Image (cartoon, rainbow, N blue to C red):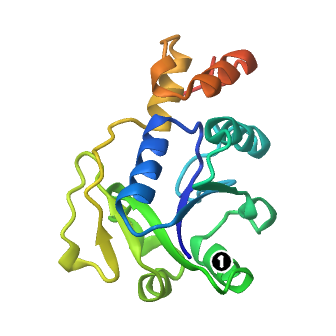
Amino acid sequence: MKIGLFFGSFNPVHIGHLAIANYMVEFTDIQQLWFVISPHNPFKPKKTLLEDYHRRTLMQIALDKEDRFRISDIEFSMPKPSYTIDTLTYLKEKHPAHTFVILMGSDGLPAFNKWKNYQLIEEGYQRYVYPRPGYPVDPARHKNLVLVNAPLMDVSSSFIRKAINEGKNVRYFLPEKVYDYIEEMYFYKNLKQ
């Protein structure tokens, strides 16, 4: 089975994540998509990051009985910060019958050569890249890259956190039950910027 691995903090998961995931399983050869929740991205500050279990709960609420998608919290039990190559190695050993591909936005490509052992990732795994505003891609300049013509989603978790912190209503940027949980738990309010 071809599994798409969608790595991210998902802080919080939003409609952009879900739209891209849906597109990948419907319009590419990916048969199932795993959301790999990262405890801490080494390229991002940790100060606004919800606890792991809260982000997992938000993802469970968002995916509510969706069988094309899975949640993977494997990185929660791995050394911190988490590195994609280590997770890929572990998953390949644990699930040898699966073929894993990486999903990433085109905004991640400029820093890809800073990833730990990026050459091993480039050689051993296909990367399915979806467009992000302001980051055009020339596939000829990259190895093992599949450019996916997914809808351009100009929404981000950082935008949502900032908007909530400023008292804005972001109800329609989030799955309904995710929005309700964030409101109930008072997440992202009164953040220090």
Residue placed most toward the observer, 39 or 127? 127
The answer to whether residue 37 is visible is no
Q: Residue 74 vs residue 27: left or right? A: right
The answer to whether residue 123 is visible is yes
Give the image location of residue 109, x and y in percent: 34, 65
Residue at image coords 49%, 87%: 120
Dividing the picture into quadrants, the one containing residue 97 is bottom right
Residue placed most toward the observer, 12 or 179? 179
- Looking at the image, is 150 positioned above or below residue 93? above
The amino acid type found where label 1 is placed reads Asp
Residue at image coords 46%, 67%: 30
Give the image location of residue 134, x and y in percent: 22, 48
> What is the secondary structure assignment of the residue under circle 1?
helix
Give the image location of residue 90, x and y in percent: 70, 79
- Looking at the image, is 19 positioned above or below residue 117? above
Question: Which residue was labeled with disc 1?
Answer: 86
Q: Say which quadrant the C terminus sits in.
A: top right
Residue at image coords 22%, 64%: 137
Residue placed most toward the observer, 127 or 110? 127
Give the image location of residue 178, x and y in percent: 63, 28
